[in-house]
Amino acid sequence: MTQPQLYTLVALAIYAIIMALIGCFSVGKSKTLDNFLIGGRNIGAWATAFAYGTTYFSAVVFVGYAGQHGWNIGIGAIWIGIGNAVLGCLLSWILFANRTRKMTKKLNARTMPDFFEKRYNSKGMKILAAVIIFVFLVPYSAAVYKGLGALFGSVFPGVETWVWMLIIAALTAVYLVAGGYVATAYTDLVQGIVMLAGVVCLVVAVLGHDNVGGLSGLIQNLGSFESLPGDPNPTTGDQLTDLFGGSSFKFLCFNIMLTSFGTWGLPQMIGKFYAVKDTAAIKRGTIISTIFCVVIGCGAYLIGSTSRLILGGQLPEGGIDSIIPTVLMEVLGNGTLGIILLAIIMILLLSASMSTLEAVVLTSASAVAVDLIPAIRKKETQPKHQMLLTRVLCLVFVACSFVFATQNIPIIVSLMSFSWGLVSGCFIGPYIWGLFSKKITKIGAYAGILSGLLTVGGATLVITLTDSFSSAAAKSPEMGVAAMAISMIVVPVVSAFTKNKKADADRVEALFTCCKEEI
């Protein structure tokens, strides 16, 4: 066993023990369904802020997005990180956090499907939302597994990738099933601290590499870069140093919009606002979460932009998804200090992915146990049975996403973009308009969900039939952005031509009056 492997295993063992202890500690705090799903709506600023940030950024951001976009676009890719911090985090907290907390508390809604049912008085909408969440978040979580598997496979080349994915799945399941949202909030806090420290160390190490030569050297060396003969992704120094992405400007804009505005409609992101305890915590959490996203997002894409220099312009054998793992081994694979840093970085990426996985798993399991099954059963489900079922379904969802991840679907970024765009495209219109306008009708909300589903699903079907699924996957950012925009337009337009029943209109009027007084 080599030194990097030994240090990484020791770090992984320590990390696993800490996560398991947090899960055991949280068991007593998750005895009710409210506590298990949303922490009893009593989670503080730091835990909520780190939960939001760590759910936002997984290993896919580093291994997939930062690796691919940093390699192809260069310095301009950092705008994705800036957009994520400003639009996906800061603006989301400012616009939605307090109002979401107040309205979901008033409605006693614990999940997004639950919010849709009680806001629009529609059990059918609750069922539809629950099905969308459970079906389309499986490939989302599978993308996270694939990213981590590729990373650990680069450090332990003799071990099959599926073994690492299985270990990650088991570790996530243990503390999530034990402690629910309380456990995830506390583990996210620990994971967030690890991520911040790891990214700072990695940025320093990467910029200090001989082929990079610091920030000034990065610009200068990238500017004089020339692609090797036979490079499948040839580029020029002007492209790599163009602050606005050069020929990739349009592609860059779509990715910024997808990964930033997409958080506005993703249930695993919005769910953090259900659990925060008060307005003061939201004000502090806004600042903390934004700083976290600036460091992690910009740091990831800065690291990706150095990849051509560090690897000498030679694309690794494993392709785009192997860029960041190869960079890590090149920069940190030699010397005791470098090996220690490599172990820390591996835990950083593990932390980032597990926090995303736990949020997605809890969201999906609750969609079935709390939203779907009670909605289609005639007999009322007891809370204790819902608790047990939610825990069981957490295990089922982990298993499903693990199996999906072991299939030969190599394009991590497109896989995640597809799920991200479709789910957010379905929910963003009904959710946002439902928070701010009492004029939105049930039919308008339905139209928003279906328009998002048809935009991504229809475009994917057409492109796949006329070309291939890989071509459709490559267009996933454009499809996702289009779905979100169409949903935001369709909801108020359809609502303007439809009406709610008198009883529903009176109920919504009372809800908004109450929320206006409290906010």
Image: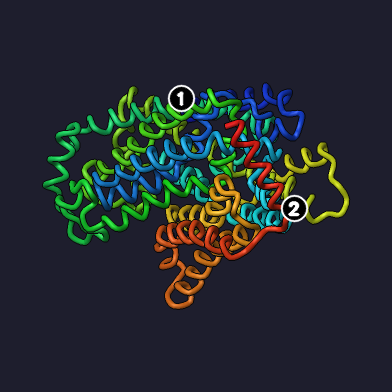
Q: Amino acid at mark 1?
A: Ile
Q: Nearer the viewer, residue 191 or 97?
A: 97
Return the x and y of residue 133 as percentages of the image width and height: 62, 52
Return the x and y of residue 371 as percentages of the image width and height: 72, 49
Q: Nearer the viewer, residue 176 or 505?
A: 505
Instruction: Tell me where residue 98 sits by quadrant.
Output: top right
Q: Nearer the viewer, residue 213 or 101?
A: 101
Return the x and y of residue 507 as percentages of the image width and height: 71, 47
- Please tell me which residue is depicted at 68% across the width and 42% down the height of the picture: 510
- Assign the C terminus to one quadrant of the image: top right
User: Which structural element holds mark 2?
Assistant: helix
- Which dot marks residue 193? 1
Residue 167's place in the image compared with 291, above or below, is below
- Please tell me which residue is depicted at 33% across the width and 40% down the height of the picture: 82
- The outermost residue toward the right is 379
* Residue 302 left/right relative to 519: left
Q: Which residue is mark 2?
A: 503
- Assign the N terminus to one quadrant of the image: top left
